Structure formats: C-alpha cells, structure tokens
Image (cartoon, rainbow, N blue to C red):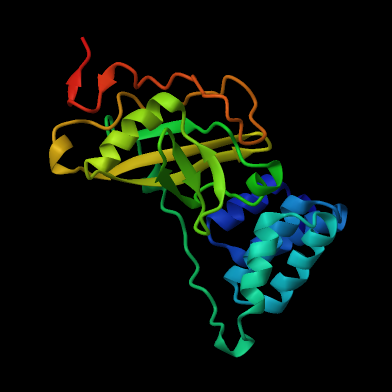
C-alpha cells in the first residue's frame, strides 16, 4: 500500500476516516520527498485524529522548519502545546457520508471560490471537510473551523446569499475539491427563514470554473458569473 501511495489516495483515506491508512500513505510520501509540506500537514492531521499528539507535534515542527509562516501549522502547534497528553482522548473517527454531496435543485450549488488564500493554506484542506460562510459587507467569505480565511464566493452569488442569510436562511458548506490554485465548495441550503419560505436559494447546481487563477486575496471585485443574476433574492421574484 505504501509503495503505491499518492496524494490522492492519502486524501481519500482521510476522507473515509481511515487514519491508519492515511498515516502510512503520507509517511511513504514524506520518505520520497521530505519537503512535501502537503503530505506533512496531512500526516500531522491524521495523528491528531488518532489522538497521538507527540507525533503530530513532530510533523508540525517539520512543516515550520520548511515554512515558518505556515498559518495552519502555527495555530495547530500552539493549540496542541496547551494540551496535556493525559487529557487527550482518541478523537472519534468521522466518515463523510456521500449523501452530503447529493444535488437538489434550488437547494444546492457547487461553486468555485475566488480571491483564494495562499497555497500553503489550501494545501491543508481535504475534500469532505466542513467549512463555514461568513457574510461581510460586500462578499461571503469561506473560512475553516479556526476562522482562517480560505476564499470567497463570487460577487453575484455573495450578493444574493447576504440577503438570504439576513432573512434567516442557514447553509452548510463542504469542500468539494481543492487544488494548488483552486477551491470548490458544495453549498447546501439547510433551512429557510420565513421571509424566503418559497424562494429557492439557487437557480442551478452546475460547476462554475474560475475565470482566472487566484493565488491570494485580490481586492479587485470578481465578476465570475454563477447563474444567479436572473433572480432577485430581496423580493423572491424573478427579474423578468
């Protein structure tokens, strides 16, 4: 298994909650390339899931030797150093149910994020990982459980969702895919506020490719179309 380990197989093992396999595969990848920060971060995460904190710290420190400004490693190491081994229980192994990715017309949408976080942040993410939407004045940001910025939804979709969120709608966001310069999220409507009880959140669930590669937080407004511009979320009526 280790001899045939690839980044994809390591990610799939983690996605399935097979942390022992994930550890073996990522160890094999690190042996091939000791500077593989992606594999090192995945390895430390797998050890955290197993409750093996000393091992997790070891690989986090190696990440920081290669990249002293790696935000994920800095935060995780700081958090782990405040814990005592005797107080750490083995974390429950979670498997992401495929049902989470079932598309429902009007209720789900696959979206390519824009204005992405640096590559070293994206490298720590895995498909199936839950992320969170944070509405700002003019956009909806995607952040991880530690509130670390990952990217943003395109402007037209953000504009609509800000209204829906303010009206009491609730959503779940899960990473669908992640690459060196791309982040795709699966957004699902989980509840509607009274104001939008009869208003679908989305007009389609088609994947929207990025119009350009985003490697950082670019202040230039994004105009990537998402198919949402034909609806007016403020009134619940079509624009035509």
List the single residue furthest toward the bottom: 86
Q: How many labels does the image show?
A: 0
Q: Which of 109 and 65 is in front in this view?
A: 65
Q: In which quarter of the image is residue 140?
A: top left
Q: Residue at x 56, y 52 (%)?
A: 148
Quadrant location of the N terminus? bottom right
Q: Which of 134 and 131 is in front in this view?
A: 134
Quadrant location of the C terminus? top left
List the single residue furthest toward the top: 240
Residue 213: image location, x then y, percent: 65, 26
Q: Residue at x 29, y 41 (%)?
A: 165
Residue 18: image location, x then y, percent: 58, 62
Question: Can you say whether 50 is above or below 29 in the image?
Answer: below
Residue 5 makes an appearance in the image: no
Q: Horizontal placement of 20 versus 209: left or right?
A: right
Q: Horizontal placement of 65 versus 48: left or right?
A: right
Q: Which residue is drawn at 64% across and 66% down?
A: 76
Residue 88 makes an appearance in the image: yes
Q: In which quarter of the image is residue 52?
A: bottom right
Question: Can you say whether 208 is above or below 101 in the image?
Answer: above
Residue 172: image location, x then y, percent: 36, 47
List the single residue furthest toward the front: 137
Q: Residue at x 64, y 64 (%)?
A: 75
Residue 228: image location, x then y, percent: 34, 22
Question: Can you say whether 67 is above or below 59 in the image?
Answer: above
Q: Horizontal placement of 208 versus 3: left or right?
A: left
Q: Nearer the viewer, residue 180 or 66?
A: 66
């Amino acid at each position: 298994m280790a001899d045939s380990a690839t980044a994809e197989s390591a990610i799939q093992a983690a996605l399935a909650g097979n942390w022992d396999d994930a550890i073996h595969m990522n160890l094999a990848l690190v042996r091939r390339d000791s500077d593989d920060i992606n594999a090192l971060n995945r390895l430390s995460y797998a050890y955290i899931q197993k409750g093996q904190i000393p091992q997790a710290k070891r690989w986090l420190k190696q990440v920081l030797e290669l990249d002293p400004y790696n935000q994920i490693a800095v935060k995780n190491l700081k958090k782990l150093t405040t814990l005592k081994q005797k107080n750490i229980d083995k974390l429950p192994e979670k498997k992401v149910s495929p049902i989470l990715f079932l598309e429902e017309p009007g209720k789900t949408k696959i979206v390519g994020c824009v204005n992405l976080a640096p590559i070293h942040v994206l490298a720590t993410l895995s498909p199936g990982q839950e992320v969170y939407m944070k509405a700002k004045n003019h956009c909806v940001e995607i952040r991880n459980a530690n509130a670390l910025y990952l990217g943003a939804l395109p402007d037209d979709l953000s504009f609509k969702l800000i209204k829906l969120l303010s009206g009491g709608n609730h959503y779940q966001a899960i990473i669908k895919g992640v690459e060196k310069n791309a982040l795709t999220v699966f957004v699902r409507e989980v509840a509607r506020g009274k104001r939008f009880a009869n208003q679908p959140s989305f007009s389609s669930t088609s994947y929207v490719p990025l119009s350009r590669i985003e490697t950082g937080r670019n202040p230039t407004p994004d105009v990537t179309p998402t198919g949402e511009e034909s609806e007016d979320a403020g009134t619940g009526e079509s624009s035509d």
